Image (tube, rainbow, N blue to C red):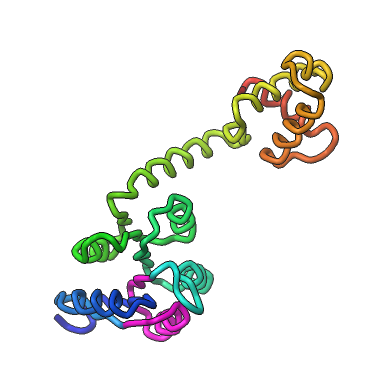
Amino acid sequence: MNKENKILIVIADDHALIRKGLKQVLDSEPNIETYEAENGEQALEFIREQKPQIAILDIEMPKMSGFDVAKQVQNESINIDVIFLTMFKDESLFNKSMDIGVKGYVLKENTVSEIINCIHTVVKGSYYLSPEISDFLIKRNNRLASSATDKSGISLLTPSEKNMLRMVAMMKTNQEIAEELNISIKTVQNHRSNICNKLDLSGAHALLKFAVEHSSGF
């Protein structure tokens, strides 16, 4: 295969054994050519100069993390697909990765063949995730769908907060709410403050206005 048709990949990981082992396997593929980087800064420099199609990045690296590199290429509008190869089976890190446009998320505990599958999937324009974290994607999609249908942010509230909002919409005072729920006025005030923070409301009558306008939604 001509060099022009090869997939140029930079592998960035500060663990030499992982990096070199992965390079050896990928270089045995007829359509892949790889370059090593031992930290995020080195990877970014190569990306800028050589314009590889794919960057396989460890999340935790010296000088620049995988997140730092991914954000920077996004900021510079560099056309490259980023794959995170990581030991972190963490939902918040996964969501953060998706938010910055990462195309693949593969766990280090899996086989190298999965990395190869990921590369070929990403090259075709699709996303690839290790099967063990597929639940994260389902939860993320459900949350995004819920957010799209609930522009007001009411879904962010707990059942007790929604009940509190319902009472506010009925023009009940803090004293009346406290008596009805058998809680202190201070607790009512704390609930109201938490609701305002979640809904990004400010001003003396903002909560009441919101409650009245959205009373049919809770």
Is residue 5 visible in the rendered image? The answer is no
Percent of width and height locating residue 69: 47, 72
In this view, the residue farthest toward the bottom is: 49
Q: Nearer the viewer, residue 105 or 178?
A: 178
Quick check: 25 left or right of 66?
left
Label count reads 0
Is residue 200 visible in the rendered image? The answer is yes
> Which residue is depicted at the point 81% across and 29% down?
186
Image quarter in which the C terminus is found: top right
Percent of width and height locating residue 197: 71, 41
Image quarter in which the N terminus is found: bottom left
> Which residue is depicted at the point 23% across and 64% down?
120
Quarter holding residue 216: top right
Q: Nearer the viewer, residue 208 or 86?
A: 86
Quarter holding residue 48: bottom left
Quick check: 90 left or right of 178?
left
Examine the rendered structure and indicate whether residue 20 appears above or below residue 103: below
> Which residue is depicted at the point 43% across and 54% down?
94
Quick check: 138 left or right of 124?
right
Q: Nearer the viewer, residue 121 or 179?
A: 179
Quarter holding residue 36: bottom left
Q: Is residue 203 magenta?
A: no
> Which residue is depicted at the point 26% across and 66% down?
119
In this view, the residue farthest toward the top is: 180
Examine the rendered structure and indicate whether residue 178 appears above or below residue 68: above
Q: Is residue 47 magenta?
A: yes
Percent of width and height locating residue 10: 33, 78
Range shown magenta: 36-57
Percent of width and height locating residue 67: 48, 67
Quick check: 124 left or right of 38?
left
